[in-house]
Amino acid sequence: MSITKAGEINIEYYVEGEGPPLLLIMGYSGQALSWGEPFLAPLRERFRVIRFSNRGTGLSDKPESPTTIRQMADDAVNLLDAAGVAGAHICGISMGGMIAQEVALTYPERVRGLVLGCTASGGAHGPQAAPEVMAMMMPVPGMSREEMVRKAWPAICSAPFIETRGDFLEEMLRASLEHPTPIRTLGTQMAAILSFDAYDRLPQIKAPTLVVHGDVDVLVPPGNGRLLHERIPGSELVMLPGAAHMFFWEQPAAAAGAITEFLSRVPAGSHAG
């Protein structure tokens, strides 16, 4: 683990493995430790994996000011600068997928291949989560952090996974509670998500793009993945059967395999600029 100055804030990050650089961008409330070893291990065999904690999470700085998806995209590019990486594959999930879209649109010269997982274009485009699903993600006054995480599981994981992989979920819970994401960050990140809208700009994305989605995702319904695929020219779509929002937890081998296979076809040194 390292801490580096990325623009005006300090960012917690990890660099592991050998090969073309692959920047992983985490989603709402998550941090660098939220990916899970079963997903990371096969990626490290093929890529120089760079994962980090977004502002407000993990050991990264936690400014009190509001934030935007564009600001977090700037953070990601500033981290690449600090790491001496001119161009990288970019993989973002959920909110991180929105950040990845913004990186591809604002800094096209920095993006080789783009992977958008369980994410959406923002705004009112695409099917929305049911109100009861969104309520599972929201903090409740008086509830412990552990209780809040457990409350969110049915929104992000399939029922069979919760039933059979409680050991993994407990492990991820313990890791998240070492440096819990502040309630304030949950609010600023949700505000950033709600204000993001890339729908009209999606056809401008020139990087080779893979969209990955679980077909039983109730938090970001799979129609959002299909919409991204339709709007981004030349993109490819992988729907993982039986996987919910955290598809990289539920089907890590399949997810890592799809990402590796796709990025292996992106020419070395290519970028969208």
Image (cartoon, helix red, strand yellow):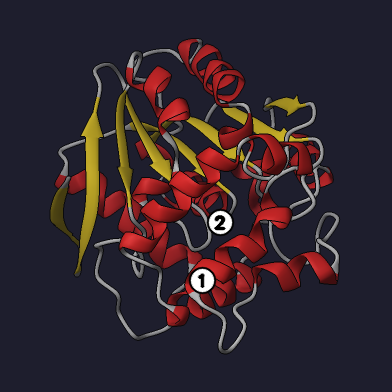
Say which quadrant the N terminus sits in.
top left
Residue plotted at (28% across, 16% down): 19
198 is higher (above) or lower (below) than 62: above
Res. 182 image quadrant: bottom left
**How far apart are labels 2 and 1 at the CA level?**
8 Å
Name the residue carrying label 1. 189
The number of callouts visible is 2
Apparent side of residue 212 relative to residue 182 in the rendered image (left or right): right
Say which quadrant the C terminus sits in.
top left
Question: Which of marks 1 and 2 precedes in the sequence?
Answer: 2
What percent of the width, then of the height, locates residue 40? 40, 28
Question: Which amino acid is tagged 2?
Answer: Met
SS under mark 1: helix
Res. 163 image quadrant: top right
Nearer to us in this view, 259 or 121: 259
Apparent side of residue 180 relative to residue 144 in the rendered image (left or right): left
Residue extending furthest bottom? 141
78 is higher (above) or lower (below) than 262: below
Q: Residues within 10 Å of mark 1 (few under 14, many from 20)?
A: many
Nearer to us in this view, 216 or 144: 144
Residue 232 appears in the figure: no
Name the residue carrying label 2. 95
What percent of the width, then of the height, locates residue 202? 66, 47
29 is higher (above) or lower (below) than 13: below
Q: Residues within 10 Å of mark 2 (few under 14, many from 20)?
A: many
Apparent side of residue 103 relative to residue 142 in the rendered image (left or right): left
SS under mark 2: helix
Question: Which amino acid is tagged 1?
Answer: Gln
Tell me, yes or no, whether the two marked residues, 2 and 1, touch with CB atoms within 8 Å: yes
Apparent side of residue 82 relative to residue 79 in the rendered image (left or right): left
Residue plotted at (82% across, 61% down): 128
Residue plotted at (59% across, 24% down): 255
